[in-house]
Amino acid sequence: MADPLVRRVRIQRLPHGKDLDLPRAASAHSAGLDLRAAVSADLVLEPGARALIPTGLVVELPEDCEGQIRPRSGLALVHGVTLLNAPGTLDADYRGELKVLLINHGSTAFTVRRGERIAQLVVARFERIAWSEVEELTTSSRGDGGFGSTGHC
């Protein structure tokens, strides 16, 4: 019996990703699905370097969803490797290969190996909005207070 909480999403493996696992959650309650590197050979990221890493995947997200490409906390903690544009946004009408923009903020070189988990994909619904332009907005207790204005910096 199909799980009513699971939404089917179409995915295509490109030739250079055929032998890699499809994105999947690491545990029963994980929100993120692990994305793997579809590199043909080891790729060394020197400190401060960045690279666009292929995943070998193309997805067809539902029109009311977006994909968020997020860093893996273990790579950030252990190696200083994260995403340059985190989270990256995957729009529902994009049909190109998912690629991950990694950067090495660490002090030593990091090697990206084929099949290595390099990022997470979170699929989320979003709301479409229509602007309603007005002369004034309602007030709030915060007002126009910016960064750190709530005292939690």
Image (cartoon, rainbow, N blue to C red):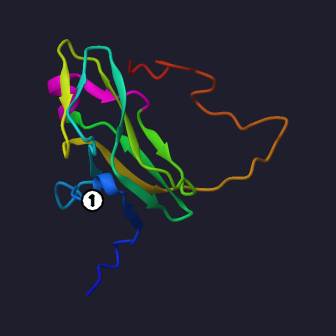
29 relative to 102, above or below: below
Give the residue number, with chain letter if any, for mark 1: 18
Total numbered circles = 1
Residue at left offset 55%, top offset 20%? 146
Residue 33, how many percent across, how many down?
28, 53
**Is residue 31 something that shows in the picture?**
no
Residue at left offset 40%, top offset 42%? 99
- Left or right for 28, reference 122: left
Residue 85, how many percent across, how many down?
44, 30
Residue at left offset 27%, top offset 41%? 39
Number of other residues with Cα within 10 Å of mark 1, as a class: few under 14, some 14 to 19, many 20 or more: few
User: In which image quadrant can residue 51 be found?
Assistant: top left
Residue 7, how many percent across, how many down?
39, 71
User: In which image quadrant can residue 14 be found?
Assistant: bottom left
Give the residue furthest to the bottom.
1
Q: Nearer the viewer, residue 144 or 109?
A: 109
Residue 41, how many percent across, how many down?
22, 37
Q: Amino acid at mark 1?
A: Lys
Residue at left offset 63%, top offset 26%? 143
153 within the magenta span: no
In the rendered image, which quarter contains the C terminus? top left
User: In which image quadrant can residue 114 be found?
Assistant: top left
75 relative to 50, above or below: below
Q: Which residues are magenta?
A: 74-85
